[in-house]
Image (spheres, rainbow, N blue to C red):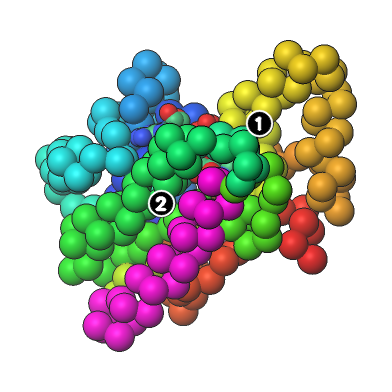
Amino acid sequence: MPAGRLDNKTALITGGASGIGAAAARRFVAEGANVVITDRDTENGRALADELGRKTVFVEHDVTMEASWQHAIGAARNAFETLTTIVNSAGISVPGSIEDVTFEAFQQTIAINLHGVFLGCKYGLAAIKNQAGASIVNVGSTLGVKGGAPFAAYCASKGGVRMLSKSAALHCAEQGYDVRVNCVVPGAIHTEMVERYIAAGIAQGSTREAVIEGFASAHPMNRLGRPDEPANAIVFLASDEATFTTGVDLPVDGGQLL
Ligand SMILES: NC(=O)c1ccc[n+]([C@@H]2O[C@H](COP(=O)([O-])OP(=O)(O)OC[C@H]3O[C@@H](n4cnc5c(N)ncnc54)[C@H](O)[C@@H]3O)[C@@H](O)[C@H]2O)c1
């Protein structure tokens, strides 16, 4: 069998039950990694771990809770002894402009998308910093680079993820840790997150095709991305092909940020 690009890695992937996290879990296993799928969605998380077989386990995990992180990392070590890689993909998107979004929705978005990544970097780093070839890959968004009027909370959370990642990357380099910290920056990717926007558009009288076209037209390549496209970028950043790459934002966005 040819060598896998992640043969020597054991990864904990948050949000691994769905979308980009699930696609990353599939790609990581295909490239030889052990994978700990974590999610608060136990049904889909367990089903995917069962499907992917003995190199995969599922752990129930709420990324907003410190104790849940400690539990998930402990469970990962119990399953595979070491941990080299953290992929922070769990996230939500609640629409709302600065005038419309409630404080509750804003706080919930920051709790999952930013506090969750903070905890993943903090506890993840403690778990992986003595391993060779370790890294953290955070899932940002083009909406963490450019503003979006209807996405005030989401943009704020994803902008935070970008800068947190750069700060952590610099810290690891300064400390001499063999740990890189990078972000993938997807445009609109056709996952359950986008399906919820499609359903909302239909509920407001639009058609499925019109909502998809609306997302697609925001990208020069004029289509939605597929979950395997950011997953492939995550594989690269987590692999030993990227050993001199840290603190970057890697767009997977059909040219949206050009
Ligand atoms: N789909 C897109 O267009 C898009 C674009 C840019 C960035 N992203 C980012 O990609 C990441 C994955 O999104 P997706 O599109 O795959 O969405 P998704 O809804 O398909 O998957 C998100 C997963 O996160 C899990 N999750 C949510 N809150 C959680 C919590 N508190 N604890 C643990 N798990 C939790 C969900 O259960 C779900 O399985 C998110 O960070 C999202 O912001 C998505």
Decide if residue 125 is in sight here: yes
Q: Is residue 79 above or below residue 146?
A: above
Q: Quadrant of the C terminus?
A: bottom right
Secondary structure character of the magenta stretch overall? helix
The secondary element bearing badge 2 is classed as helix
**Residue 226 percent coordinates (x, y):** 68, 39
**Which residue occupies 73% across, 14% down?**
203
Q: Is residue 142 left or right of residue 169?
A: right
**Ligand 1 lies under 8 Å from the Cβ of mark 1:** yes
**Which residue occupies 69% across, 50% down?**
148
* Residue 113 lies in the magenta-colored region: no
Which label number is shown at residue 146? none
- Which amino acid is tagged 2? Leu
**Which residue occupies 42% across, 66% down?**
165
Q: Is residue 197 left or right of residue 235?
A: right
Q: What crowding class fits label 1: few (fewer than 14 Cα within 10 Å), some (14-19), or many (20 or more)? A: some
* Residue 167 lies in the magenta-colored region: yes
Would you identify the image quadrant in which residue 169 lies? bottom left
**Which residue occupies 28% across, 52% down?**
119
**Residue 105 percent coordinates (x, y):** 47, 35
Which label number is shown at residue 194? 1
Along the line of sight, the residue nearer the viewer: 227 or 99: 99
Q: Viewer-nearest of labels 2 and 1?
A: 2
The secondary element bearing badge 1 is classed as helix
- Dot 2 and dot 1 residues touching (CB under 8 Å): no
Residue stretch rendered in magenta on the structure: 153-177
First in residue order: circle 2 vs circle 1: 2
Along the line of sight, the residue nearer the viewer: 45 or 3: 45
Q: Which residue is mark 2?
A: 114
Q: Is residue 77 left or right of residue 229?
A: left
Q: Is residue 166 above or below residue 150?
A: below
